Image (cartoon, rainbow, N blue to C red):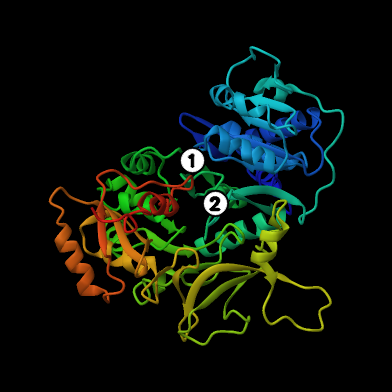
Amino acid sequence: MARLLHELILEQAERAPAAAAVVHRQAGLDYAALASLIQAAARGLLALDLHRAERVAVYLPKRLETVAALFGAALAGGVFVPINPLLKAEQVAYILRDCNVRILITARDRADLLEPVLVDCPDLHSLVLVDGTSVARRRLHHIQVIDWPELLDADARRTAARTIDIDMAAILYTSGSTGKPKGVVLSHRNMLAGALSVVDYLDNRTHDRILALLPFSFDYGLSQMTTAFAVGARIVLMDYLLPRDVINTVARERITGLAAVPPMWVQLAQLDWPPAAVDSLRYLTNSGGAMPRATLTALRRALPKTTPFLMYGLTEAFRSTYLPPAEIERRPDSIGQAIPNAEILVVREDGSSCTPGEPGELVHRGALVALGYWNDPAKTAERFRPAPGQNPGLPLTELAVWSGDTVRADEEGFLYFIGRKDDMIKTSGYRVSPTEVEEVLYGSGQVAEAAALGIPHPMLGQAVVAVVKPLRDDFNENALIACCKQRLPNFMAPLRVIVRRADLPRNPNGKIDRKRLVEELRALFLEPAI
């Protein structure tokens, strides 16, 4: 039984070597070939003098080399750091410096863009380029440069250091409510426990074909790979282009499992799904925010054979809850109950348990709780705190993740998301959940995308402002406002509606970028009237 992340692939290579493991465009690898590739990558990294727990960053779109680099780093005893390919040079350089990356694996065009900032990354000693058969120069600043074939052909003079399941496997950078991104440190145990838990409730099997649509720098995206490899299924790599491309890929590759975030589901729900996609898609999953009820209804209508799984998670604990599909009719707004091998608590500020219906903070305990934030003890202490209700006889303190999210539980223990502490809108003394306002906006049938924001206001504290992208050309702003006033109390109804014809901005994980929108609209009510 696998205890380390890379052993998922190695065990499948022994069990079913000829089974398809990963597909990218017209290329693919079976499990035997994938195992050989990650073993060669691991030898090459060791030949580059990678030592125990040193960081290997992978700044690439989804391709076969990306998969080999990530798992090869783990096999070599290192820690992989997947960097979102959408990030710009300065953002990449921040991550490289913050977690002291030693080896960077990327492509030639990306390396050219990074050249001005790599001089300020003193810990970086090697740059591996995956495209081309030879490199034009052997050094870039203080960094040696080699190509991918050289890495694979290298013969390490030493073996990897012994690794056990509580050792670091990955660092995933997640945006915070303030300041720079934080590096969440995940152990082999964290990632394996997460994969096995998801496999349990999704009932994944070897015949599944899972589409990897989300970035690997996003824990939800990375888990599509670990889930597939845990059962010997096939993962199909795709970098998101247009919604129609996603549906065409589902049909062409006979995809059985599809994971996405709410803005993406909103777009996919507006399209026609061909019969081949309808017949092949066994399940879909949603995380990264609440799926609007109107979107869920549209997807269920378009995909009658597909089982929807509504989930809640956070990078610091991977995945916390899921709603059993049998409960969707009765509880379409619920985020469900704890996933297998996790306990979810709803607590007051003092750590005492909330009563049913009482809002409180979601606290996650169990094997999925991460090791903390890289090189940031202060932020780690804020989020990773002693689990509530510990037995006083235990001499060691168990740490749990205090999510910062406000939820409530019903009488049967099903949870309902209310909002994040840093997303909650405080207006006229009331606390308003953006999710509740957005549900009404989507339910109007007039908007394709929506974000409810709290914008500074001299009298209200914050004003509720809705930023929307119309669904149709005959969009009627007055009708939307009337719908909100009809379905929401006055203090929750948007004071202004901002119409955008283009897509709303997104952060690197595909979620609507609320921070950017708030900054753009910050002066909306503060500028003096002319």
What is the x, y in percent for residue 529? 25, 56
Front-lying residue, 384 or 308 = 384
Distance (Cα) linking label 2 and label 1 = 27 Å
Q: Is residue 468 above or below residue 423?
A: above
Tell me which residue sits at (77%, 57%) in the image. Answer: 166
- Asked which quadrant contains residue 63, the reply is top right
Residue 91 rendering spot, x and y as whole percentages: 57, 38
- Residue found at the far top of this picture: 136
Side of 426 relative to 115 (left or right): left
Q: Is residue 74 above or below residue 451?
A: above
Q: Crowding at label 1, few (<14), some or many (≥20) Cα neighbours within 10 Å?
A: many
Q: Secondary structure at mark 2?
A: loop
- Give the amino acid type for the residue marked by disc 1 in the picture: Val
Seen at 67% across and 79% down, the residue is 388
In the rendered structure, which amino acid carries the disc numbered 2? Ser
Q: Is residue 243 left or right of residue 350?
A: left
**The image quarter in which residue 457 lies:** bottom left
Instruction: Look at the image and tell me in which quarter the N terminus lies.
Output: bottom right
Does residue 17 show up?
Answer: no
**Image: 263 above or below 422:** above
Q: Position of residue 53 (x, y in %)?
A: 78, 44
The residue mark sitting in front, 2 or 1, is: 2
Q: Is residue 112 visible?
A: yes
Mark 2 or mark 1: name the one nearer the start of the chain.
Answer: 2
Q: Indicate whether 230 appears above or below 313.
A: above
Residue hosting label 2: 175
The residue positioned farthest toward the left in the image shown? 474
Label 1's element? strand
Q: Nearer the viewer, residue 31 or 389?
A: 389
Q: Which residue is mark 1?
A: 236
Q: Position of residue 60 (x, y in %)?
A: 56, 33
**Which residue is nearer to you in this view: 176 or 418?**
176
